Image: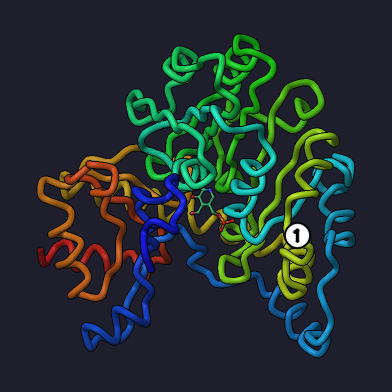
Amino acid sequence: MQSYLIRKDILNIEAYKPGKPIEEVERELGLKGVVKLASNENPLGPSPKAIKAIQKNLKSLNRYPEGTCSYLKGKLAKALGVKKENLIFGNGSDELIDIILKTIKNPGAEIVTSDTTFVEYKICGEIMGFTVKCVPLRDFTFDLDAIKAAITKNTKVIFIANPNNPTGTYVNAQKVTGFLNDIPKDILVVFDEAYIEFVTEDDFPNLIPLINKKNIAILRTFSKIYGLAGLRIGYMIAQEKFIEYAQRVRQPFNVNSLAQAAAGAALDDKSFVKKTRSCVAKEKKFLYTTFLKFGIWFKKSAANFIFVRMNADTQKVFRKLLEKGVIIREMSQYGLNNYARITVGTRKENLKLIKALEEL
Ligand SMILES: Cc1ncc(COP(=O)(O)O)c(C=O)c1O
């Protein structure tokens, strides 16, 4: 393929690098029982109610899925206290980033986000021809003042991951309210709340009551607390009018029928959500204590992963841990060569990580 056929916007884009899959590491290194603490997945597996719903729906796979996720939408709208018209579903919340950017007016438009956050905002933005401005974090946290200062008349969208991936930090309700009052009303502010269900901090913002008052969109996912990352389903909550436009650009059957059934059942699986939340809270404390003992610096996290600094090149630590059957995420793609992100696992998984670290 000749590059003269390729859109200029994507010539210099680096493709998204996912965490290494367990099977690939086991095959390549001849290992068994590899532990993956690299993609912020649910360590307890999928919601059991979701598994049952998937089994029940297998026989209908000859049918196209329900295009608008109508049943699931009704159920979720009730659970969130919003209207069905405030919701749209995506093939993972990833797809909704794309859908948002397909909806927003361009060319000549700018996106503002942070330089150390979920990399899809930048990748999707550049693919769609936006100029993406990435401002530094302050103390590993989204710096809303720096974002405000980076706004120009061309800024159309701001992406804020709250809590932030990879640092696990969050911006509190007071800061978010002040920020939303200060910035021009015609900018869409997207709050990516992929990890909100793990948050226990009281001052975390509740943005749903602001949906019709401010120009905001909220992204959430079934990939994390509900354990359905493999099915690919997420959703956006926003003003009716914006959702209506976004519906026009999505693929007609973007969310498959098993994902819809599983997500609906997972919403009812209160005991699984509770169990996951308490496992992550307990294991996060256990890892904090261990890191302190090892002299490993870390940032306290509101999510299900911990951002750590090791007194070594983490690319090397990453490779050595891999040989010992533990996959973590090193941060060299952000230019943070001494940092890594470690997903909170079960006690058994965390002990394997600790043993491997001790051996290093
Ligand atoms: C902040 C953030 N947003 C979105 C996603 C993607 O979620 P989904 O699996 O729903 O596409 C992730 C995944 O790690 C994430 O960390």
Position of 272 compared to 34: left or right?
right
Closer to the camera, 157 or 33?
157
Where is residue 185? Give x, y as percent: 69, 15
Going by the numbered disc 1, the residue's amino acid type is Leu
Residue carrying label 1 = 267
Q: Is residue 37 visible from the viewing direction of this image?
A: no
Residue 350 quadrant: bottom left
Which residue lies at the image location 39% right of the left edge and 66% below the top edge? 347
Judged left or right of residue 41, residue 259 is right
Q: In which quarter of the image is residue 283?
A: bottom left
The x, y position of residue 95, in whole percent, is 61, 54
Q: Residue 47: image x %, image y %?
A: 65, 70
Q: Residue at x 28, y 41 (%)?
A: 298
Of all residues shown, which one is farthest toward the top?
Answer: 182
- Please tell me which residue lies in front, 138 or 46: 138
Label 1 crowd bin: few (<14), some (14–19), many (20+), radius 10 Å: some
Answer with the quarter of the image where residue 116 lies.
top left
Tag 1's secondary structure? helix
Q: Identify the coloring.
A: rainbow
Viewer-side residue, 222 vs 152: 152
Who's the residue at 88% across and 48% down the image?
78
